[in-house]
Amino acid sequence: MREEDLPKRILVVGLGKTGVALVRFLREMGVEVTVTDIKKEDELKPQLEKLGDLNFKSYFGGHRREDFFSTDLIILSPGVDTNFHLVLEAQEKGVKVTGELEFASRFVEDPIIAVTGTNGKTTVTTLIGKLFQEAFGEVFVGGNIGNPLIEYVMQKKKAKFLVLEVSSFQLETIETFRPNCAVLLNITEDHLDRYKNFSEYVDAKLRIFENQSEKDFAVINSEVTLKNNLRAKKFIFSSRKPVNEGAFFDGEKILVNVGGIEEVYPRSISPLFGNHNTENLMASILVARLFGIEKGLIEDCIKKFRGLPHRTEFVRELNGVVFINDSKATNVDATKRALESVNGPVVLIVGGKDKMGSYKPILEEKEKIKAMVVFGEAKERIIEELGDFIESFIEKDLESAVKRAYEIGIPGDTILFSPMCSSFDMFRDYVERGNRFKEIVMAL
């Protein structure tokens, strides 16, 4: 998009990190900006401080109908529901609506690698970013993690590659967004508090491929069922069956075949544990090989990559009891994967804001669960679905839950904090929640 093609008046909905970046960029471009957020002004003080003396209109503590109708374009932050009634009414009256990812991508001509999936996308985005930084130098890593894409547009400093984590929320509003390589790690039930049903959530995820051409790459988990034919060249990764082109885990090593070149990567070179991380490694290696990164560099990088905080993170061992922080597990499948990756018996701490999915898939791992400690907004529904099958205890908050779990645990047990729910009932985000868990554990 050229500067002269920018609309004269733009409404930014949501003043989180993405909204702040958008306002800064749009004012720099001379656009008349209005910002609206459901939070009150005093709750947005840190964001407003970052905007300093920039001149823009604003309305906080709710949304005004007139702001949605007296603008040329509405840009939604990722957390804003596209089905919000004022958004829909504005669209009916001809106001254009888009999201930050789509808007920012129109200013980008550099190669994009985009990673999505219900679980693992932050780990894979980070690892691919490190691989590409080692191989090519200047690489931008961001999107749904770190810096929004519009930050890259603003810095006016070219990167050889952009590695972006993209969420289903961001993909809802794309029109022209086209990654040169799109990675889909997995799709399991999540965000049913936002989507009408699981199928609608799947459709949003699959949009990552819709604008790709025959020149592009699609890296996909063999467990994902595609609804439409891909135009991009497809590479599959699997731990269940060998693949013609892609990556396969045979139980000990990762076998990679790209362009007829076969390579073997011992699984033991990575310090990350669990089958979910095996899949993350396969996807990352595949992307690296597709862009010509050499095997030796890939292996060196994998050896050094120790994962990210709040993802099956070892905290401490106390009197023979191991504490694991998996605060990033904001859905049932993530908790199930964590249970698969740790040794039992497990005292499981769960709870938080209910995302309205079923908790019953966790029962597939119930033989490993010695007891379950539940807290937070979702506690009653979790107990309703799982309490007849797993010995369960309800606590008022995270600190009480940790202390109860430690009372239950004996030497040889693992206390796994893997909440199955989002954090917003009690915490700002999963990071604050995970850090609080670690503080409580270290104080025991």
Image (cartoon, grey):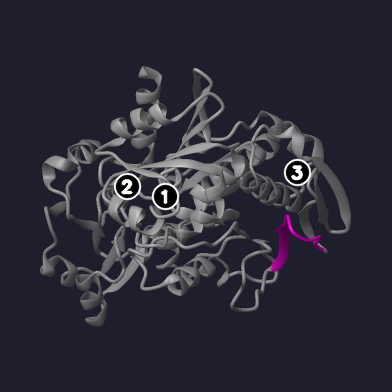
Q: Is residue 62 magenta?
A: no
Q: Residue 338, image x and y in percent?
A: 54, 44
Disc tally is: 3
Sequence-first tag of 3 and 1 = 3
Helix, strand or loop for disc 3: loop
Q: Is residue 146 visible?
A: no
Q: Which residues are magenta?
A: 233-243
User: Mark 3 sits on what residue?
Assistant: 293
Per the model, the C-alpha gap separating discs 3 and 1 is 36 Å
Which disc is residue 227 wearing?
none
Tell me if mark 2 has few (under 14), some (14-19) or many (20+) residues whose alpha carbon lies within 10 angstroms of its own. many
Q: Which residue is mark 1?
A: 420
Tell me the kind of residue under disc 2: Gly
Give the residue pinned by disc 2: 352
Q: Secondary structure at mark 1?
A: loop
Q: Is residue 239 magenta?
A: yes
Q: Residues within 10 Å of mark 3 (few under 14, many from 20)?
A: some
Mark 2, secondary structure of its residue? loop
**Residue displayed at 53% across by 57% down:** 117
Q: Earlier in the sequence, mark 3 or mark 2?
A: 3
Quarter of the image with the C terminus is top left
